[in-house]
C-alpha cells in the first residue's frame, strides 16, 4: 500500500490559506540577533472580569526525562511540559506569572489573536517590560481562535530550558466526533544550558531551523525519552483526538502510529476539511489535531523522527486496555526505529 504522508505544503492546500513563519519572531531575542526593542511607549494593559484565572511560577527545577536521567532546568510550576491552560472559545483568561528565575522573563501565547490585547503578547521591550526576578505580571486575553495552541517564554533561549506548556481552547461546535483526547508535545532533548555562538535569519522558517542551533541529543514526547515512553491509553472502538504540538526550536518531525491511520482535522488551531494520512510532518511551532480510530488492539509505537537531522528519534505508546504488554509492530511507517 502506498504511504499517505501529509507535508506542510499539502496542509496549507487543505486549509486554503497561508501561515507565517512565527519562529522568526520568537527567536528575535537571541544573542547576536538584529532586532532591537522599539523606542516609544509600550501598550497599556487592559483588565476586565476574567472567566478563568491561572497562576504560574517560572522557577529553577530538577527535570526528569527518564528514571535514570535528570538535569537542572527552568520550568513552570516545576513541571515539564508546564501545566495545561484550558478555556472555552471566547472566554476571558487571566494568568498571573511569578518570576522566580535568576533573570528576566515573559510569556508569549502562541496562536492567540490578541485583538486589542497587544500588551499581553509577551515580547519584552516591545509589548511589555520584561518581568524581573522576584516580580510578577498579570496577563489577560480573550481566547480566540479555538484549537490547540501553546505558551512559552519569549526571552533568549529560555524556550529551550523547558519553559513551555499547552494552551487548549475548546471549540463552541465540534468539527469532528471523538471520545477522548490526549496532548503530545514534541521537543528536543537539551540536557545542558542551551547556548548559541551566533544566530542569523538565514535559513529560518518552517522546517529550516536556524544556523548554529543548540545541538539536541534526543527527541522527547511530553518530556520523556523513548526508553521510558509516554503512554496514550485507549479502549478498542474509541476515537481518540491527539493534539500534537512541535515545541522544538530547530526541528521538523515526521509523526506516525504503527497500524493506524491519522485523520487530520485541525492545523495550527482552526478546523480543516479532514484528510486521512499515514504520516505527517510537523514543523517548528506547528500544531496538528488528528483523530485515530482504535480498531487494532495491542501496544503500538507512536514514532517521531526528526527530518533532515541525525538526532535520535522519539517514541510514545498507543496502549489498548487489556493489552498483553508486548509491543506490536508492522514495520515503521516513518522510517525509524526506537
Image: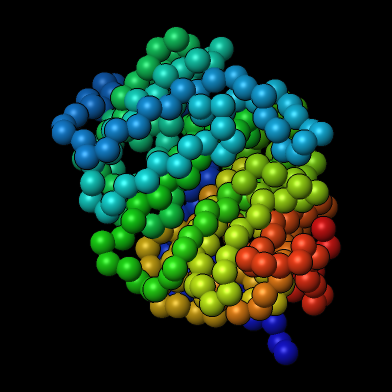
Residue 306 spot, x, y in % from top left: 73, 56
Residue 10 spot, x, y in % from top left: 54, 74
In this image, 306 relative to 92: left or right? right
Q: Which residue shows up at 58% across the image and 46% down it?
A: 247
Taking depth in this image into account, of 85 and 215 the one nearest to the observer is 85
Taking depth in this image into account, of 144 and 35 the one nearest to the observer is 144
What kind of colouring is applied to the model shown?
Answer: rainbow
Q: Give the farthest residue toward the top.
A: 134
Q: Quadrant of residue 201?
A: top right
Q: Quadrant of the N terminus?
A: bottom right
> Relative to 73, is 256 above or below?
below
Q: Which residue shows up at 56% across the image and 32% down it?
A: 79
Q: Quadrant of residue 140?
A: top left
In this image, 188 relative to 292: left or right? right
Residue 258 spot, x, y in % from top left: 71, 72
Q: Give the farthest residue toward the bottom.
A: 1
Amino acid at each position: 500500500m502506498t504511504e499517505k504522508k501529509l507535508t506542510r505544503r499539502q496542509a496549507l492546500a487543505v486549509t486554503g490559506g497561508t501561515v507565517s513563519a512565527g519562529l522568526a519572531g520568537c527567536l528575535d531575542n537571541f544573542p547576536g540577533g538584529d532586532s532591537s526593542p522599539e523606542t516609544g511607549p509600550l501598550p497599556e494593559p487592559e483588565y476586565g472580569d476574567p472567566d478563568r484565572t491561572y497562576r504560574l511560577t517560572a522557577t529553577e527545577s530538577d527535570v526528569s526525562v527518564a528514571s535514570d536521567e535528570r538535569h537542572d532546568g527552568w520550568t513552570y510550576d516545576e513541571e515539564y511540559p508546564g501545566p495545561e491552560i484550558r478555556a472555552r472559545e471566547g472566554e476571558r483568561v487571566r494568568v498571573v506569572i511569578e518570576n522566580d528565575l535568576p533573570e528576566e522573563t515573559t510569556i508569549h501565547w502562541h496562536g492567540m489573536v490578541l485583538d486589542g490585547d497587544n500588551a499581553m503578547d509577551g515580547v519584552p521591550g516591545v509589548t511589555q517590560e520584561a518581568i524581573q526576578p522576584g516580580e510578577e505580571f498579570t496577563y489577560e486575553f480573550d481566547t480566540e481562535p479555538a484549537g490547540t495552541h501553546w505558551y512559552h517564554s519569549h526571552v533568549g533561549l529560555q524556550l529551550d530550558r523547558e519553559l513551555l506548556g499547552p494552551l487548549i481552547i475548546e471549540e463552541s461546535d465540534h468539527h469532528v466526533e471523538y471520545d477522548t483526547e490526549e496532548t503530545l508535545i514534541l521537543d528536543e532533548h537539551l540536557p545542558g544550558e542551551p547556548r548559541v555562538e551566533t544566530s542569523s535569519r538565514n535559513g529560518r522558517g518552517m522546517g529550516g531551523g536556524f544556523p548554529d542551533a543548540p545541538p539536541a541529543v534526543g527527541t522527547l514526547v511530553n518530556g520523556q525519552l523513548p526508553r521510558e515512553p509516554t503512554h496514550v491509553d485507549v479502549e478498542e472502538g474509541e476515537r481518540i483526538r491527539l493534539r500534537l504540538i512541535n515545541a522544538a526550536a530547530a526541528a521538523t518531525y515526521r509523526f506516525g502510529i504503527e497500524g493506524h491511520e491519522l485523520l487530520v482535522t485541525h492545523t495550527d488551531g482552526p478546523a480543516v476539511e479532514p484528510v486521512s494520512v499515514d504520516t505527517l510532518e510537523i514543523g517548528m511551532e506547528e500544531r496538528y489535531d488528528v483523530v485515530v480510530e482504535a480498531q487494532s488492539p495491542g501496544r503500538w509505537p507512536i514514532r517521531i523522527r526528526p527530518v533532515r537531522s541525525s538526532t535520535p528519534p522519539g517514541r510514545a505508546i498507543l496502549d489498548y486496555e487489556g493489552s498483553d504488554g508486548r509491543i506490536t509492530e508492522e514495520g515503521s511507517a516513518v522510517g525509524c526505529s526506537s
